[in-house]
Image (cartoon, rainbow, N blue to C red):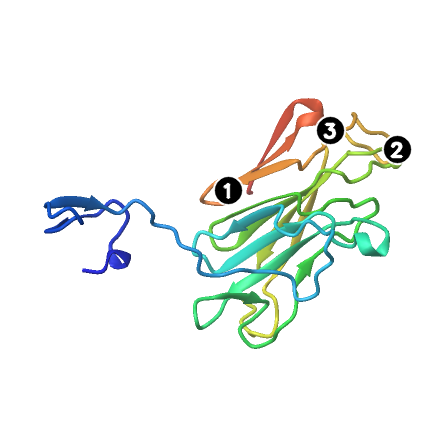
């Protein structure tokens, strides 16, 4: 049997290991490089690939690019989005249209969106923007955004994913901030997508959010 067809950990007998001896071989290298992704329009400084996550059903892939937009003077950051094609490959937006699909934060002071990303279930993802400015332009206040897949959108030319909710560093007010929390430096979601966690190492905190 071809070793490529064996699952990781499987063992087979061979009657000649090269030295004329019987031997048991176990598959040790289950991962192989099958695909490379890159932006259609690449800015060499945008840090594409700083974070990567896929949904549990592998229907969507998210790639963080925290310096996206730097060529325009401000590194607002972005998260590239890909879906599975009919050939079981990740492609931008849909298996029909080509081009980049990039989520960005349309909010004052957004910086470094996509420095972290996590996905769970089939319909939820979260991405951080820990360098985002505070209400008075304080550095490293941070944001995190919840992304949601709308199951009613089935047109392959349209992205079913959109920003659902913007999370801000707790106790931040329209004029004050608790400090350079770097909220969004790390993010995680439970497998059932009912819990989201956002790290703020600048304040030595992790914040938990429950789906209601």
Among the two numbered marks 2 and 1 on one chain, the one whose residue lies closer to the N terminus? 2
Q: Secondary structure at mark 2?
A: loop
Q: Picture coordinates of residue 15 (x, y %)?
A: 10, 51
Circles 3, 1 touching at the beta carbon (< 8 Å):
no
The residue labelled by disc 2 is 175
Q: Picture coordinates of residue 21 (x, y %)?
A: 10, 45
Q: Secondary structure at mark 3?
A: loop
Q: Secondary structure at mark 1?
A: loop
Query: Residue visible at 78% across and 31% down?
Result: 172
Query: Residue visible at 24% across and 56% down?
Result: 3
The residue labelled by disc 1 is 194
Question: On screen, 195 above or below 54?
Answer: above
**Marks 2 and 1, how far apart in space?**
31 Å
**Marks 3 and 1, how far apart in space?**
24 Å
Query: Residue visible at 50% across and 52% down?
Result: 54
Q: Which label sits in the foreground, 2 or 3?
A: 3
Task: Compare residues 210 and 187 and report the one nearer the observer.
Answer: 187
The residue labelled by disc 3 is 181
How many other residues sit within 10 Å of disc 2, few (<14), some (14-19) or many (≥20)? few
Query: Residue visible at 79% across and 46% down?
Result: 110
Residue 13 seen: yes
Residue 151 seen: no
């Amino acid at each position: 049997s071809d070793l490529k067809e064996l699952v990781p950990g499987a063992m087979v007998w061979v009657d000649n290991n090269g030295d004329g001896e019987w031997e048991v071989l176990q598959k040790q290298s289950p991962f192989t490089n099958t695909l490379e992704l890159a932006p259609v329009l690449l800015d060499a400084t945008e840090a594409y690939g700083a974070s990567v996550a896929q949904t549990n059903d592998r229907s969507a892939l998210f790639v963080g690019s925290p310096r996206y937009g730097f060529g325009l003077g401000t590194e607002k950051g972005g998260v590239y989005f890909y879906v599975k094609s009919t050939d079981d490959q990740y492609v931008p937006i849909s298996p029909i249209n080509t081009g980049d699909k990039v989520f960005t934060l349309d909010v004052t002071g957004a910086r470094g969106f996509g420095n972290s990303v996590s996905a769970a279930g089939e319909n939820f993802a979260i991405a951080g923007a820990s360098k985002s400015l505070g209400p008075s332009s304080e550095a490293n206040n941070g944001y995190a955004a919840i992304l949601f897949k709308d199951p009613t959108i089935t047109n392959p030319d349209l992205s079913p994913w959109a920003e659902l909710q913007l999370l801000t560093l707790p106790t931040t007010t329209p004029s004050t901030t608790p400090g350079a929390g770097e909220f969004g430096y790390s993010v995680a979601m439970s497998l059932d997508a009912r819990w989201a966690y956002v790290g703020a190492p600048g304040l030595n905190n992790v914040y938990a959010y429950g789906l209601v």
